[in-house]
Image (cartoon, helix red, strand yellow):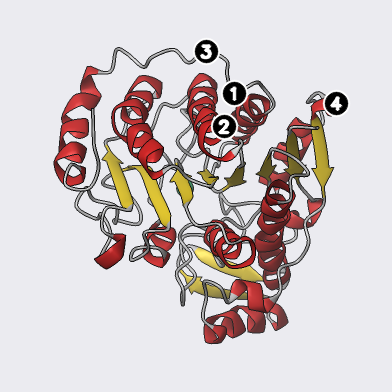
Amino acid sequence: MTRTAIVADRRFMAHVAGRHHPERPERIAAMIEMTEHLNRANLKRYLPREATPAEIELCHSRAYIGEVERTARLEHFDFDPDTHTSAATWETARLAVGGVLTAVEAVADGDVENAFAIVRPPGHHARPDQAMGFCFFNNVAVAAQWLATHHGIKRILILDWDVHHGNGTQEMFYASPEVLYMSLHQYPFYPGTGWFDEVGVGRGTGFTINAPIPATFGDPEYLQIFDAVLLPIARQFAPDFVLISAGFDCHFRDPLGGMRVTENGFTAMTRRLHRLAAETCNGKLVAVLEGGYDLEGLAAGGRSVIEELGRDPDERIAAAEGAQRALPLIERMRHYLEPHWQLP
Ligand SMILES: [Zn+2]
């Protein structure tokens, strides 16, 4: 079986967020061009389908979906100072949700083991009733809800390493014990949420995990947070499906983010999640493009993830080390999470 699917389409370039906007069509061109240099034998290529309004309604209100739909008649519309539409936004945003559904469907049906969905506009800031942070519909959140609704999948892990906190995704599953949402993000930074003490509510308490990290952290610190906190909790949760909100704005070249993650870091984070998925759910994993605004860093990071997904998950994982700077942060995470999880 071909291990990895790629969902991609130049139609994702149709949405224009504004002149000189960092979330630009060229991001998709850079990613597609990168995939053309990958070993074709290991990859199955899919075109995205459009999500139906009923599918988008899994996470968004009908009234808000109507608001986005109405922008299709306008040259442009501003939802907020960062988040602008063009006439093609409605169609492109539906296609982005549908592209992630195409990827999770291929994996859930067993056509491939894992997949990478190259989509835009991104999704993780989109709230049930509100566009924000370049996002209109929450692609990953709809996919998680769709897996639960249409495939009866009970436990879904969403790991979000985009440099920004995925406030929309957190909000949608804040009270749910079925979706474990973990985010590593720069703090203080846009959108301002994602502090240690945001751990969920009601039955969902303990199922939201935030690592608000200072600028300048890089591979050693990210991996130490994975090994000391995130992976031990993810193993106890034992997901039936793993989703990655894969933003590449934590890459060291990114003009918006202040982090220092390299290609090796993306490979190592993916390897850990790939191994986890192999242990708990026959390797079912889908990575979804979120942010990433340096075209070179974006393509290099994307290549690292896709190549790693094509490898054998049993390959050796070197222990994270040399990250003294991460220890105080790990201690604070432990403080908030120990009531809910066994930590080493
Ligand atoms: Zn981002």
- 293 vs 216, left or right, is right
From the image, tell me which residue sits under label 4: 41
- Measured as percent of width and height from the top left, residue 340 is found at 22, 48
From the image, tell me which residue sits under label 3: 316
Amino acid type, label 3: Arg
**Mark number, residue 278:** 2
* Front in this rendered view, residue 106 or 291: 106
| C-alpha gap between disc 3 and disc 1 | 8 Å
| C-alpha gap between disc 4 and disc 3 | 24 Å
What residue sits 52% from the left and 42% below the top? 247
Q: What element carries label 3?
A: loop
| C-alpha gap between disc 2 and disc 4 | 21 Å
- Measured as percent of width and height from the top left, residue 282 is found at 61, 37
Amino acid type, label 2: Ala
From the image, tell me which residue sits under label 1: 313
Quadrant containing the N terminus in the rendered view = top right
Amino acid type, label 1: Pro
Which of label 4 and label 3 is nearer to you? 3
- 312 vs 111, left or right, is left
Circle 4 residues within 10 Å: few <14, some 14–19, many ≥20: few
- 331 vs 55, left or right, is left
- Sequence order check: which comes first, mark 2 or mark 3? 2
- Measured as percent of width and height from the top left, residue 153 is found at 55, 57
Amino acid type, label 4: Ala
Q: What element carries label 2?
A: helix
